[in-house]
Image: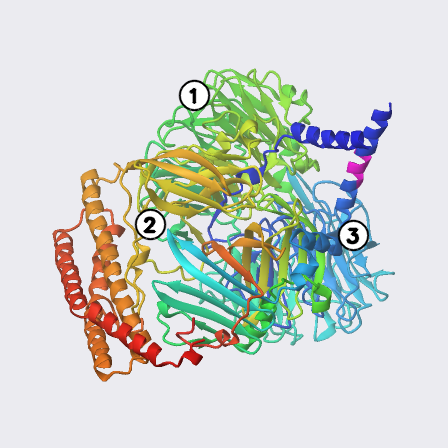
Amino acid sequence: MRNFSQLLMVAAMIFTCNINSHAQTADEIIEKHITAIGGLENWEKVTSVKITGSMNFSGVEIPITITTLQKKGQRVEYTVNGMTGYQLLTTTGGWGYTPFAGQTKPEAVAPEKVKESQDDLDIQGPLIDYKAKGNQVTFLGKDQVDGTECYKLKVVCAGGKEKTMFIDAANYYHIRTVEKSKANGKEEEDISNYGNFRKLPEGIVFAMSVDEGEGPATYKTVEINKPIDETIFKPSETKK
Amino acid sequence: MKKLLFLFAAFLIAGNVFTQTKINSYTFGAMEARWLGPGTMSGRITAIAGVNADSKTLYVGTAGGGVWKSTNAGASFKPIFDKYCMSIGAIAVDQATPSTVFVGSGESNMRNTVSIGEGLYKSADAGDNWVKVGLDSTEHIAKIIIDPKNPKNIYVAAPGPLWCDSKHRGLYKSTDGGDTWNKIFYINEKTGCADIAVDPADPNTVYATTWEFRRFPYAFNSGGNGSGMWKSMDGGKTWKELKNGLPPKPFGRIALTLAPSAPQNMIAIVEAKETGLYISSDGGETWKSQSATTNVVSRPFYFSCLVIDPKEPKRVYRPGYGFSYSDDGGYSFTDASYDGGWVHSDHHALWINPNYTNQMYLGTDGGVYFSLDRGATWMFVYNLPVGQFYHVAVDNNNPYRMYGGLQDNGSWMAPSAAPGGVNNSSWLDMYGGDGFWVQPDLMDNNIAFAESQGGNMARIDLTTFKSVDITPQAGKDDEKLRWNWNTPIVTGQANRRNLYTAAQYLYKSVDQGRTWQKISPDLTTNDKKKQQQEESGGLSEDNTSAENHCTIFTLAESALDENLIWVGTDDGNLQVVTDGGKSWMNVSKNYEAAGIPAQTWVSSIEPSRYSKNTAYVTFDNHMYGDMNTYLAKTTDGGKTWKRIISDEFTGYAHKIKEDCYNKDLLFLGTERGLFASVDGGETWFRMKNHIPDYSMVRDIQIQPQTSDLLIATHGRGIMVVNDISPMRMISKEVADKDVVLLDSKTMMLTTGKYGGGGSPVSGGWYGGNPDYIEPIEYYLKDRATKDVKLEIYDDKGKLVQSVPGTKRKGVNKVFWNQRMTPPKTATGSTKMDYGGFIAPMVLPGTYTVKLKIGDREYTNKLILKHDKGNTLFSESDREEQYTAALELYHMHEQLAALVDKINAEQKLIKENMDSVKKGSTKKLLKEYNAKLEELRSTLLATKHKSMFADEKKLRENLTEVYAAICGQESRPTNLQSGRIGVLNDDLKKGESTYEKLAAEYSAKVQQTIKEEKAKVAKSVPANNSN
């Protein structure tokens, strides 16, 4: 009899858990997400990230390096057929250089696009300390990402960029972002899928693969808080 | 406590043990439908709303394709309402906060085939997300108006249900931005609210029109005592009827609008015994009769759109049967010209840019048009694939051709694949009128049969589209033939030569409709009370064959026996014959015993191809106000029926389809969705495979050679899910496994079926092509959180290529391009060379696929075969091609190795040039570098950067011939083969030159640099050595 009542208790606990899971708020989901990816304290320490990896196009590995200094600059560098191109973003400007596409010198990014892209310089992601950063988050309920049940969060970043983030309801990992940009009179939507989550020595969990629909990027190394020479954010054809 | 924890764990484990993985559309999620359009002929548009602030954001509501949004004034559109009801009645944008948008579902152009809605929706983020805010049972919404001075006040005109009485009609108002709603004006259960207008200067002044109307399966009535025109001066609290100057009642439908720039000026088209246009200049208190042109008075129940220019009160637009405009307040009208191309008739929506009133968008039964000259001329918007198909058929060509008829837009055909992909130009208009059934003659590739409304049918020569009328005519003792709006024309399943059509009698032809034989008596109930169509319409006569009744609606010949024929009628008869047409048996009482209402419209019949006694039938009772999904199965030739029920089902049923290879795989199409069962109908799931959740699925076909699933939607054109064979493979047992690498079919080696210039499609709707190679497929019970990749090995165990895998839950499809890993090509050039992205196609043989997920591996065999169907490319051609390609592949890698050596030597020189002090050493380094550079510049492009400046050296020359040989399905030409030898000589020469240079300089240079470094080190004082 006692066992039966214990069983009922267990059932009640499970039932309660289910009820709670339906009544989650954006803050609760964000808190669980941040816990799942290593905790607020560890993420708040992240001030720079340097990623090396590659993208695969029909069997060809394109090396990529992404270097980001929190709220200061980002350099995305890729090497094709021995030629290196890049995209730069700083708080004041942006440049793109793709020599393999016939560009002979870096080309400036339109100011409105630079302004709209400032939110991309937040390497911690928009959910870490989101209120302090001025980001607004709305919980839109549950939705499916290719059959995986997710919490759907709409994030309007302080800089104006709108992101819909999908948090896997089973493990609270962030598995998809749908990002909308409107700069220069064009409304565009980009989808990024995240996977291959790995815990780094710094205690944070990092997605080691990102697929933006043009061939997935697979990361090999992620260095956290290594010194970054800020001159890499300046345009130069030969800068590496 | 320990025990409790143990129990807790056991409970959870038990839960997992007994939880079976549910098979649903996500199980097959990677099987995404292609939307093939057409966009060249679109579908009925019911609402258009724009954002005044930017003049370029448009929302377009459709009769059966949901809501489409453009942010570039119509250059491109995307669907934004695909999780909800596809039938749209009205759209409104809050111009004060344009991210707030309301969509009223349920079109209110109350024709026979109009669909139903399920309420009102609101988006607070410009259409990204939607929330239903009420009015669930209104079924049809005609207009939404937001108070321009206080956007919390919103009015919704709901005509209400078409097929039954209802209390859910009337004028609704929200005073809290849409959160809650009150019905503020209601006449009776037969009368709804058809139109509203709010005075922008004094928003408490509200005008409304009420409309009494009703449809039956066999008749329509517009008009009655409930219809009227009304005015409120207190925001809808009290109302008075407006009559002064209007024609005598009863009224039918009234379209009403006011001039935004002078709101006391109003116009209305009043359906009455003498329908006409009326104007008022005193806020509706008095009215004066104006014009009664054909375009003003035509079909008031269907054409209820009337618009006054935002700035000029006398400029009136009447989108109706045609498009006409007036500059004198509606006294006289001018018709639009066709100088910009033909404008489809039947107009229902118009949005005028208030900032530039020359610019306007028109919604018709054939899509959206835009004008830049105030409606005088129009241009078509070719990128909205919202055509309303009734049926789809396929033939057995390769690629197969698709055929189907569109509501108000004729009959069309297109290939399932085409050079450059299926696009607007792929679709050909083969027959006119409203289109319904189109049947290709599978015995004669140049013939198809098509029809227009009311049973007018023809045999069509597909080489010219010339047609011959083959409509059966009434014989001496026949009653007047009763043809359904959507008359069946069906070819035999067992005997492809058989062609059937039906009025109330069934007809059969075995000579393409040249001679017909009547093979049945009247198979309907022949209820004369339901045959008064000439009286249909109400105040305005309207008898276009849409209400024809007591007709045969569907029929099917068994694939197992040509003498076994099923017939279903629109008045509930289900008849079967087993002797080719002599002894008919009416089994309608038998299906009634299974719980399906009597007199229900029989919408489709699917005789099983696995048992003669088995058949599936769908029934549609919505015309009596019953929206339930009716599907039944017999296994004893119709004697008894079992109703198939599922909680998943929504919408009245149109079509049941049994797979041609797996008897347990079934598809059901309803007014609100596509459903599938993989267990013979025991359980069902909604298919969401890039298919809108509530698609109106009118017909379903499976093309047997390709296993493609074709869906005829009534609002989103034809959709094709390529190759549904995974649905035949995934059983419940398979679905319970964590990972399954599915058995690969034997793959044909191919570069694809088509070539072409590769120019991007310049506008219009693009449906693309099916994947030209077979995918490698694997099933994941859950989304992978680890890295996923596929490795292909040859029969010697050598890695051929590594391909990134996808991680989605369910079936994943990954495409290996049937090629090796591309070669490493020479680097250090001023330009990119694309040779490094090209690889030889592998040879036929048995390969091994390794699926790697994290540290787990799954292995399968993969057989590649030469495509013997390609008679221009023999297996020996392939071998020669491979040998040549491989030779060039190796030459590229040899050249890369050579250039690497040069690059390394030059790097050494560069790194030391500044540090060496001795003049002779500097000279030596410069000399060696110059000679290396001289050699390097013969091996790859080193001078020009611009993409517009060619510079061909050995690397580029290699790529030229390498790309040509790898990219084609052909034996190399004699000169291509010869060229390999020439280039190989160049490579050898380069290698030789380098060897000589290296022999002469390399050791010397390295030694000299070493000596200089040693000297420098020696000269540094010891105390500085740290």
Looking at the image, tell me whether mark 3 or mark 2 is earlier in sequence order.
Answer: 3
Tag 3: amino acid: Gly
What residue appears at the point 20 percent right and 46 percent down from the top-left corner?
B883
| One can see residue A163 in this view | yes
Are both tags, 3 and 1, on one chain?
yes
Check if residue B653 falls in the magenta segment: no
Choose the circle earlier in sequence order: 2 or 1.
1
Q: Which residue is mark 2?
A: B821
Q: Where does residue B430 sit, x and y in percent of width and height?
A: 40, 46
Residue B475, relative to residue B127: is it above or below? above
Which kind of residue does numbered mark 2 sit on? Thr
Q: Mark 2 to mark 1: distance in Å? A: 54 Å
Image: magenta residue range: A11-16
Q: Magenta residues: mostly which secondary structure?
A: helix
- State which mark lies toward you, 2 or 1: 2
**Which type of secondary structure does the marked residue at label 2 adopt?**
loop
Which label belongs to residue B170? 3
Which chain is mark 2 on?
B
Q: Is residue A202 left or right of residue B131?
A: left
Residue closer to the observer: B729 or B825: B825
List the residue tagged with mark 1.
B562
Is residue B364 found left or right of B994 in the rendered image?
A: right
Residue drawn at x 24%, y 80% is B922
A114 to B167, vertically: above or below = below
Viewer-proximal residue, B764 or B440?
B764
Q: Up-down: is B614 above or below B730?
A: above
Q: Secondary structure at mark 1?
A: loop
Subunit bearing disc 1: B
Could you classify mark 2 by the number of other residues whose Cα lies within 10 Å: few (under 14), some (14-19), or many (20 or more)? many
